[in-house]
Amino acid sequence: MKEVWVLSVRTSLPEICYNAEDLKTSFEVFTSFETAKEALRKKLREYAFAESPMFDGKGNLANLADDLAFEPSDEDGGDEGDCIELTPDRLQAIKNALKTAFSGNDTDIGLKNARYWGNLIEIEISDGAIRFCGDGDGPLNGCDPVLTTNIFNMREEKDYYLYISDLFGQGDTSELYIDLKKTALNRAETWEEIEERAKRTKCTRCGRQFDFFDAQEAYGFDYYIGYGSAHDGSHVKADLCCDCFDELLDSLIKESKTTPVLYEPIC
Ligand SMILES: [Zn+2]
């Protein structure tokens, strides 16, 4: 079994993303973590240091406005337990860390592991990863994560990701989903063949173009239906992307009298 590092990028950048059809997927395969990491950093620099609907061309997210944080309160009342007030200084520290990471350098987020609550956003910091959500009551489209990443410090050989969705709904912007994943090639195909198959395949359920991981896992079914089914005589075939496979499996688990999950790893 051969292991490779796959860098997958899904984005409409440098164009605005109006709907999912605008997102294009590309992927590159590397045999070493070091070369894969350099390729990821090159991508980050290319995106963050070019003017676009998402970045200001200087390594900053265009829509991550300062007024998303609180002005410091007199008695520092927000700092209780693991929920900490997101002051402009703390937001700036996060922005600086993001810019350093986008520049291609290892850094630390500079704030302790906790949940931070700002004017309109919540930020969760945990073990070198960060997750921004819109505040549920605010105008920022509820709680969906709008920025999730662990690219701050890439010294360790492990999977890295950067997901930026329609950032806080402020004006026209793009979406950017980058994954660097260690992947075992356990089929009798080369990665070039898997890549070719991905280009030729769309998810039957959601219509999305397959990426490398979808093609490698190749979830779905291909049956010539026989007696006992209302579809007797038909040939049915479905190619499922990993997200649709998860959703279908989740609903099957919910509807089933016995569980289809025979083994589950303990994380
Ligand atoms: Zn799908």
Image: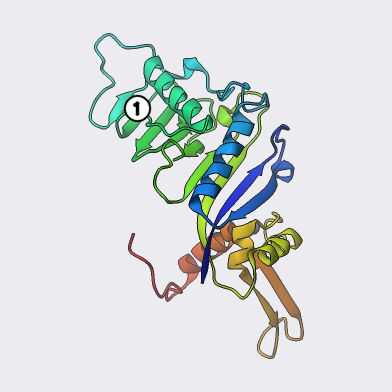
**Observer able to see residue 241:** no
- 159 or 231: which is nearer to us? 159
116 up-or-down from 145: above or below: above
69 up-or-down from 191: above or below: above
The quarter of the rendered structure image containing the C terminus is bottom left
Instruction: Report which quarter residue 63 is drawn in.
Output: top right
Mark 1 Cβ and ligand 1 under 8 Å apart: no
Give the quarter the ligand 1 occupies: bottom right
What kind of colouring is applied to the model shown? rainbow
Residue 99, horizontal then vertical, whole percent? 50, 26
Q: Residue at 43% across / 27% down in the picture?
A: 97
For label 1, the residue is 110
Q: Residue at 26% across / 23% down in the picture?
A: 79
21 up-or-down from 74: above or below: below
Residue 182, horizontal then vertical, whole percent? 50, 57
Residue 69, horizontal then vertical, whole percent? 43, 18
Instruction: Report which quarter residue 265 is drawn in.
Output: bottom left
- 15 or 245: which is nearer to us? 15
Element type where label 1 sits in the image: loop
Pointer 1 local density, CA inside 10 Å: few below 14, some 14–19, many at least 20: few
- 22 or 189: which is nearer to us? 189
